[in-house]
Amino acid sequence: MPDADPMYLRKRLSAQLQAARKKAGYSQPEVAEEMVWSLSKIMRLESGRTKISITDLRALITFYGVPEEMAAELLVHAQEARRQPWWQEYRNILSEGFKSYLGYEASASVVRNFEVLFIPGLLQTEEYARAILARSVVPEKEDLLDLRMRRQERLLQGSTGTELRFLIDEAALRRVVGNPAVMRAQLDHLKEVSQLPHVRVGIIPFEAGLYPLLRSPYVIFEFPSTEQDRVVYLENPDGSVILRDKATVGVHRSVEDYLEAFWEVENEFARPVSESQVSDDLT
């Protein structure tokens, strides 16, 4: 199983603290009054926006009457959450949303990624990624390219134990990014990566017609612990991401809706990369 990212552990710890408070029957103002803390401090701790000290955590564990086994787990999480994440050197160029994204990506046991416009970032060659970033408005293009390549190195080598599953619309393969030579190399790379034991790449051909949730890219993160809910990320047109870890996404869709759509498309519409005709068309 992958080593949990410190940011992921902080968010999980905050959720566990909130659950422990509710189980003990206290409101946030009651805890603040008992601990002689500000209400805003309790809110920050339960939202994961701030790290909790071991001293404060022990005090809450005692006040909530947390069982010994759970208390030991919370203390381990608090200590591990104080480590620096592997992407720490890039922190100044990352939005808070993308920091969370990296935390979930590094901690997930399964990553499911659907893309309709471009090859998924974890599968992009350096030349393909560079061509995309050249068209972006972000100033830190080389740093972001380096970050993308390092993410690939961590996950594609298989040492983290993360299972990677990708669905790519044929439109992403047909769109020439950079030039035909870049695309040929990219498609060859897709075929090579799809042979890795922990990677599965499915291509959705044009002839599949309309299929569930085809309009926007999304990523589903699944975690080793059954206590941690799945998380869905949606991508905005500008490339930024929106976290959806609550019950509903938008008005009617739930996180489970995205998972069911992914399964349906993967089983009924997707084909292996080796069956794709696109690379032959570009040669």
Image: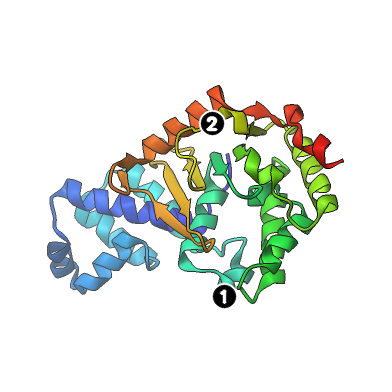
**Element class at badge 1:** helix
Disc number lying in front (1 or 2):
2
- Residue 76 lies, in percent from the top left, at 45, 52
Q: Residue at x 63, y 70 (%)?
A: 89
Q: CA distance from mark 1 to mark 2?
A: 42 Å
| Quarter-of-image position of residue 115 | top right
The residue carrying pointer 1 sits among few (fewer than 14), some (14 to 19) or many (20 or more) residues within 10 Å by Cα, namely few
Quarter of the image that includes the N terminus: top right
In the rendered image, the vertical position of residue 240 relative to residue 185, given as above or below: below
* Vertical order, 59 against 247 (above or below): below
In the rendered image of this protein, does residue 72 appear above or below residue 86? above
In the rendered image, residue 40, in percent from the top left (x then y), is placed at: 24, 72
Kind of residue at disc 1: Asn
Q: Secondary structure at mark 2?
A: loop
Q: Amino acid at mark 2?
A: Gly
Q: Residues within 10 Å of mark 2 (few under 14, many from 20)?
A: few
Tag 1–tag 2 contact (CB < 8 Å)? no
User: Can residue 162 be seen here?
Assistant: no
Q: Which residue is mark 1?
A: 92
Residue under circle 2?
A: 209
Residue 267: x %, y % from top left: 55, 23
The residue at 41%/54% (across/down) is: 243
Residue 45 shows in the view? yes
Image x and y of residue 53, in percent = 38, 67
Residue 27 as seen in the image, left or right of residue 263 = left
Q: Quadrant of residue 230?
A: top left
Identity of the residue drawn at 32% across and 52% down = 15
